[in-house]
C-alpha cells in the first residue's frame, strides 16, 4: 500500500551520483536506514534501483524521482510520463516530477502527465520554482507542491539560501501541503520553513553527501584560521 506523508518534520534525500563513493542502491539503502534511525519521517530517492532498495530497507514513505538529462530539454526531474510510471513501479509512495510548464522530451504537457498519473491513483509531488508554477500545479490537483527548483530555473530567484519566501507564499495561496526543499544547510533554516507553514522539509547534501559536508567545514576553517 502506498502511503502519503502526513506528519510534519524532516525528510532526508538520499542521492548519490555515478563516480561518487556512495553511489549505488546498497549504499543509499544504508544511508536511508541511518536517516530513519535519526528520526526522518520519509526518504527522497533518485532512480528505480535506489527506490526499490530503500523501500525494502525502511518503513517510512519514499518520494521517488528519476533524474535524466535529455539534450535540448531543461526538464530533468522525472521528465516524461514513462519515467514517472517507472518510479511508481519501483515502489515509490509519491512520484516527484518537474512541475514547471517547460517543454518535456515526450511532447506531453504538465497537465497531460498529471492527469494520467492521477487517473491511475498515483500520488504526485510537483517540484516548482515560482509561485505561478505552484498555483498552476495546485489547479491541476497534485498532492504536494515542493520548492525544489527555486533557483534552478533561468527565471526563478537566484540565491544561495532556501527560498523561505516562496514557501510562505505557497502556503498562503494554496490549500495543499507545501514542501520546503533546496539549499537547506542549517537547523535554523529548517525551523524557519516549518514556521512559514511547510508540511515538511527535505534535506539532502547537508546530511547525506559527506564530500560536500567535509568541503564546507574545510572552507570555514581556511577562512578563519591561518593553516600555515
Image (tube, rainbow, N blue to C red):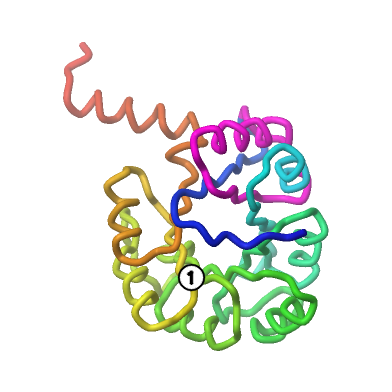
* Image spot of residue 203 (x, y percent): 46, 47
Q: Locate residue 22: give its quadrant.
A: top right
Q: In this picture, is 135 found above or below 45?
A: below
Q: Residues within 10 Å of mark 1 (few under 14, many from 20)?
A: many
Q: Residue at horizontal 29%, vertical 61%? A: 195
- Left or right side of 187 for 223: left
- Left or right side of 174 for 60: right
Q: Residue at horizontal 52%, vertical 82%? A: 138
Pick the quarter of the image with the N terminus: bottom right
Q: Which residue bears the numbered disc 1?
A: 177
Q: Residue at horizontal 33%, vertical 59%? A: 193
Magenta region: 21-49
Q: Is residue 47 magenta?
A: yes
Q: Nearer the viewer, residue 111 or 90?
A: 90
Q: Nearer the viewer, residue 192 or 131?
A: 192
* Image spot of residue 54 (x, y percent): 71, 42
Amino acid at each position: 500500500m502506498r502511503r502519503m506523508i502526513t506528519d510534519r518534520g524532516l525528510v532526508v534525500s538520499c542521492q548519490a551520483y555515478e563516480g561518487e563513493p556512495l553511489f549505488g542502491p546498497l549504499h543509499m539503502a544504508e544511508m536511508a536506514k541511518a536517516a530513519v534511525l535519526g528520526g526522518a519521517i520519509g526518504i527522497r530517492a533518485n532512480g528505480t534501483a535506489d527506490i526499490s532498495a530503500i523501500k525494502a530497507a525502511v518503513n517510512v514513505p519514499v518520494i521517488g524521482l528519476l533524474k535524466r538529462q535529455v539534450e535540448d530539454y531543461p526538464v530533468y526531474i522525472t521528465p516524461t510520463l514513462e519515467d514517472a510510471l517507472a518510479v511508481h513501479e519501483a515502489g515509490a509512495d509519491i512520484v516527484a516530477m518537474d512541475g514547471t510548464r517547460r517543454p518535456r522530451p515526450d511532447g506531453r504537457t504538465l497537465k497531460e502527465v498529471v492527469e494520467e498519473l492521477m487517473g491511475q491513483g498515483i500520488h504526485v509531488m510537483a517540484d516548482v520554482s515560482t509561485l505561478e508554477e505552484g498555483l498552476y500545479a495546485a489547479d491541476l490537483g497534485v498532492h504536494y507542491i515542493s520548492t525544489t527548483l527555486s533557483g534552478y530555473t533561468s527565471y526563478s530567484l537566484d540565491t544561495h539560501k532556501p527560498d523561505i519566501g516562496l514557501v510562505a507564499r505557497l502556503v498562503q495561496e494554496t490549500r495543499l501541503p507545501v514542501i520546503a526543499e533546496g539549499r537547506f544547510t542549517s537547523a535554523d533554516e529548517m525551523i524557519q520553513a516549518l514556521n512559514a507553514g511547510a508540511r515538511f522539509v527535505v534535506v539532502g547534501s547537508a546530511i547525506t553527501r559527506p564530500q560536500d559536508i567535509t568541503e564546507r567545514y574545510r572552507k570555514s576553517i581556511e577562512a578563519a584560521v591561518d593553516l600555515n
